[in-house]
Amino acid sequence: MSTSHVIWPAPAKLNLFLHITSRRKDGYHCLQTIFQFLDYCDILHFQLRKDGQLSCKSTLKDLEPEQDLTLKAANLLKQYSNTSLGVDIQVEKKIPVGGGLGGGSSDAATALLALNKIWQLDLSLDVLAQLGLKLGADIPVFIYGRAAWAEGIGELLTPIELEEPWYLVVHPGCHVSTAKIFNAKDLTRNSFPIIMQDFVAGKSTNVCEAVVCKLYPSVAEAIDWLNKLSPTRMTGTGACLFAKFENNSQADAVLKQLPDKWQGFIAQGKNISPVHFSNMKTIL
């Protein structure tokens, strides 16, 4: 491992629904959601360093070090473990930024998982999840790598088994500010708690969708367009939308009709994260 260059995936996620049940005194929102992974991933490259130095470069332009969750995760793990080792990380971004697909959190989680192996720390997933929670509420689900029913601020996870359909994911071309949505005065914060049977029966929504559509007209336009072809929902706080299909060819038929002003991709829903079932590639 000491002379290796290793490559790990960092998958996107979908929120299949999103309800906010209350707001805590510290400003965090209590929510209910379902996380499911996609086989659509950023790619992270790791090169071990023995001099203790850390570096992280991304194909994402204008990413300041203080905003880089991947570098923050590496620093946090180094401080926690007190290792003398370091690493060079390169991040190949594929997941749209500000799209509600969890790319930044997933990159950070993959960094924690990969460095736990590369630095031979042997920390448990529970410890890594607790470290990740310091950086973001949805990092633990990427650490555990199982589709989950989530409550609390998103960190109370119950693994579930879901169908694994094909999804068409559409990005309307705008960057949605999560903070802006969660601070919106007209955001619904008193959703009545539901159970899994309610979700299966179709009694769920994304309460952020109405606020996002009001503030970002391109999201509303894209939802209207895609809804005419298949039932559509926004993931997280947006901007990305998703519609599910039984197979790849059905999703592709709709993708081919997508207006040029928007971007889209097809991915399959996964109950086990690609970071846990993939064979990580090692280049000696």
Image (spheres, helix red, strand yellow):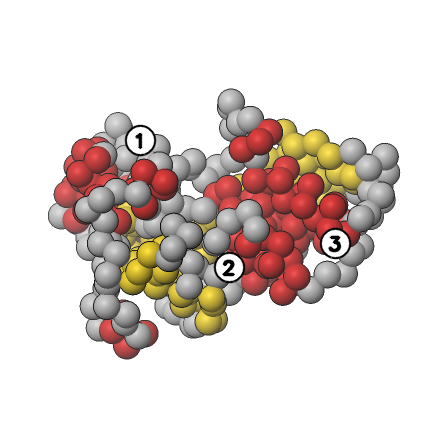
| 61 up-or-down from 183: above or below | above
Give the vertical position of 159 relative to 104 (above or below): below
Identity of the amino acid at label 2? Answer: Val
Q: Is residue 109 left or right of residue 88?
A: left
The residue that appears at 51% across and 22% down in the rendered structure is: 62
What residue did someone put label 2 on?
Answer: 141
Q: Which residue is drawn at 55% across and 47% down?
A: 135
Quickly name the residue at label 3: 117
Q: In which quarter of the image is residue 68?
A: top right
Q: Select label 2 or label 1 by which is in front.
A: 2
Horizontal and vertical percent position of residue 71: 63, 37
Helix or strand or loop: what does disc 1 sit on? loop
Q: Residue 60: x and y, percent?
A: 52, 28
Q: How crowded is mark 1: few (under 14 residues within 10 Å), some or many (20 or more)?
A: some
Q: Residue furthest front?
A: 25
Q: Earlier in the sequence, mark 1 or mark 3?
A: 3
In the image, 93: left or right of 197? right
